[in-house]
Structure formats: structure tokens, C-alpha cells
Image: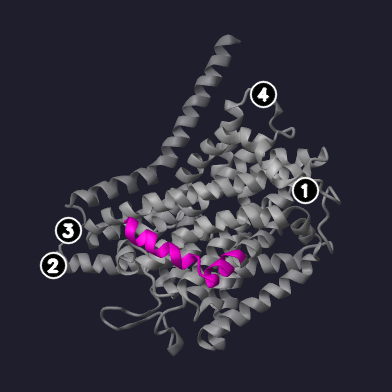
Amino acid sequence: MFEPMLSSFSQILEWQSLIAVAIGVLSGIVVGSLPGLSATMAISVLIPFTFGLDPLVALGMMAGIYNGAMYGGSIPAVLMRIPGTPAAVATCFDGYPMAQQGRGGEALQVALVSSAIGAMFSAFALMLLAPPLSKLTLIFGPPEVFWIAMFGLTSIVFLLGGGVIKGLISACFGVMLSLVGADSITGNERFTFGHLELIDGINVVVILVGLYAMPPALGLLESTGSKMNTVTTELRTEGFLKAFSRMFKFWKTWLRSSVIGIFVGILPGAGGSMAAFLSYNEARRASDDPDSFGKGNPEGVAAAETANNADTASAMIPALTLGIPGTSVAAVMLGGLLIHGLQPGPMLFREHPDVVYGFMWQFLLAAILLFFLGGTLATNTFAKVLRLPRQLLGPIILTLMVVGVYMIHESMFDVYLMLGFGLVGYAMERMKFPLPPVVLGLILGEFAESNLRLSLRMGRDDWSILVDRPVSQIIIALTVFVIVWPLIRKLLKKSKGGEVNGGVEKKA
């Protein structure tokens, strides 16, 4: 474990890797600071342009964008009370009141330091937990892998929140897309409708760019008002090292929030928003002055930003080892791995140790660069990004999408598909259908199908092979638990509400 990890460390110190991560961090901060855009969209647009690049260079840019965008979301959250990313909602609670009090610079510095620390803890968790977990999964055969895929699909549907029916429809749509093309075993064409371009299936990048990049671009075109206005015109900040020494009193909050963020990141479908809310509530509960939260307490900003950044690299733990992404960004990054010939799963660590361990180091490098680049450039410089006309960004993003997708196969057919999926994604967002289950269904659908058929071949068409192995039974039990847990939670809430109402009636 440690030998390949140490040997891969030298690779990330090469100038190509350093520049790639730095560009990713800076781009991520810009993207995160613009309400309506996201790391998912940015990485989706980036992926087509990484063809021909060294995998570590491409993955380094993705890691940088991920970490940069999570911090960047705090800029409009503090200055405008508009979270740049969904994970920055909890940052608004105390960040915006601080800006109204003339402490916007302080709030952004707290957010930056906390984001970097949370990202560092998350990177260390990825390094420590992913390698042993990958070795454990080597004992899995096709039946166990099939159930892992089913567990991933049900987790994202039932734990994501919102309507379960809509989540199931989205997941089934993704699975159907994974079936397009020639059958990998028989060679028979499926759902190609006579188009030769579909024999090899639909390129995952085409779908990702369409679903995730086009809806926010169209949203920017629809937006009213030429510019986004902030509550402050100039941010007053103190020396960065002085600010860090003053903030060290938050060390308990940083540690507690990092643990919460890492744990939530590993859970499929939970995401940075849940991590930030849980951490914020825990910080308020543990505080000696809980009433100050929501009125400009910097500890609230520290708790939220530490947790949502601790969610980044940790979301890649199940993604790299099991092929089950913890967040929608991790799902898109899985697509980035696939186009570079890197199949997520336990064999990834055995066949490409230099790439996977280098990728882990790049998350740590991104956190360190976030600390220094953000401290040097973030506050006043990136706050000015908010003054850009929103209608200008939409055409730029759409142009990058078309050029990037066309470059994949130099085919307009891919561009038409991308535009079609973009309209589908736009409609799904309007109708509140979640997009992450589509991506997971697309990635895990083929995975589940191939392992199901391998299992049946092993068992000579005896379906009992899927349920008669101990590891399979454990995964099935976890899958059932994920399905019934929302119902159990709802019943518990009802019973608790009944007890409260009963107590009130008796008292009356």
C-alpha cells in the first residue's frame, strides 16, 4: 500500500500536474462563485477536452475544480445570501450577517481556511481508507458485484431525498441508456434504431455534458438583470497568516466537522449539503453561545465550510473501490475515469496504482493550493466575478460544450445527441426529476447486467447463486434496509408527533 503511494508522490510534483491542479482550483473558485453553475457542470464541460492528455493531468484538473468550486460557493453565500453551490446553503446563515456587519472579508477568510482544512482531512481519509477497502473487495465475485451495483442504485434513489418515484424513473432511464449498442456477449444490436453511430453505445461524456452542463447554461440565458449585485463594494481583510492564527480557536470545530463531512461523503447520495447542515447544527449544539448562531458567528461559517469540503475526496472512496459515487460530482468524475480507460473497482488499484494513488495525492495538493491561491486571490478578486453579465456566460458555456463534444469523434451526431440530452436534462430539472440517478444508472447498468449474466453462467442458469453466498446476503440486507429506512423514519416521526400531541392534549 505505502510503496506505490510513495512512488506516485513524485508524479504530482511534475510541472504538468502542478499547473493542472492550480488551473483546476482557480477555475473551480470562479465556477463556484457564480450562482447557477456547479462543479458538476464544470467537470462535465472539461472532460471532452481531456482526450489525449495524460490521465493524471486530466484527473488533477478535476480534483482542483471540485475543491475550488466547493469554496467558491461561499463567496456569493457570504456577499449575496445566494449559495453558489447547494453545499453552501448553511454558509449563508452566518456569512451573510457578517457581511452586513462589514465583516465580509473576515467571513471569506474563515470560509477559505476552513475549506482548505476540510479538504485536507478528506484527502487523508481517501488515502487511508480506499486502499484497504479495495483489497477487501477483491474477494467479491460476479454475484457480489451485481448486488453492489444494485445497492448503489437503490442508495442514490432512496437516500437522495425528494420523490422516490421520480428517483426510480431517473435511475431506470439511466439503465436504459446503458443498454444502447451491441450486446457485449451476443453482439446483437439493441436500441440503435439503424444508426451505426450507436453500435458502440452512447458515449458517457455526451450524456454527462448534455444533462449537467446545458440546463444551467440555459438558465443563465433566461436570467433577468444584467449583473449580480453584492451587498459590499470593497472587502476589508487582515493579513492572511494573522487571520489564520486568530482562527485557530476553531480547531475543535474543524476536527468535528471534518469527521462529519468524511462520513457523509462516503454515503451514496448524501452530499455536501447534508454534511454542512449536520455540522452546523452540531457546532451550534456544542457552542457556549448557541444564540449567536445565525447572527454573524464565524464558527457557523467554519463548521459549514469544513464539512462540505471534507465531503469531496471522501466521496471518491466508494467511487474508486466499488464504482459507487458518493456525490453527483463523483459520478461525473467516474465518467472521466472511464474515458481514460480506467475502470473503477478493486482492479483499478492493481492495474493502475500509479494513476489512482497519484489521483489521491492530487486531492491533497488541491487542498494546499486552495489555501494559498485562495488566500492570495480569492476575496476581492473573485468577488468581482459576481459583476459579470449572466447572459454572457450562457453562450460561452454552450460554445464550449459543442466544441468539446465534437472533438470526441469529430462527429455532429454526438453534438445532436448532446443537445437532445441537454433538453431532456433541462426538462427533468424543471419537473424536479433528480439527475444523479441517471448518471449512476448509466454507469452501473452495464456493470450490473454483465455481472448478472456472468453469475448465471457460473451457476448454470441457477438463480440461487445470487442469494446463497454470505457476502451477497449481507449486501442484500443492506439494500433492503436502504429501501425500507425512509418508511421507518416516516413512521418514527409520526409516532413522535403523536406522543407530542397526546402530551399537549393531556396537559390541556
Can the viewer see residue 34?
yes
The picture places residue 236, in percent across and down from the top left corner, at: 81, 46
Q: Quadrant of the C terminus?
A: top right
For disc 2, the marked residue is 460
CB under 8 Å between discs 3 and 2: no
Q: Which residue carries the number 3 mark?
A: 465
4 or 3: mark nearer the eye: 4
Above or below, 206 relative to 498 = below
Q: Main secondary structure of the magenta part?
A: helix
Residue 356 in the image: state x and y as whole percent.
40, 64
First in sequence: mark 3 or mark 1? 1
Left or right: residue 157 versus residue 462 is: right
Report the residue marked by disc 4.
Answer: 289
Spatial separation of the CA atoms under disc 3 and disc 2: 9 Å
Sequence-wise, which precedes: disc 3 or disc 2?
2
- 116 or 145, which is in the foreground? 116
Q: What element carries label 4?
A: loop
Q: How crowded is mark 3: few (under 14 residues within 10 Å), some or many (20 or more)?
A: some
Q: Distance between the residues labelled 1 and 2?
A: 63 Å
Q: Earlier in the sequence, mark 2 or mark 4?
A: 4
- Ranked by sequence position, the earlier of labels 4 and 1 is 1
Q: Indicate the amino acid at tag 3.
A: Ile
Magenta segment: 1-22
Dot 4 or dot 3, earlier in sequence: 4
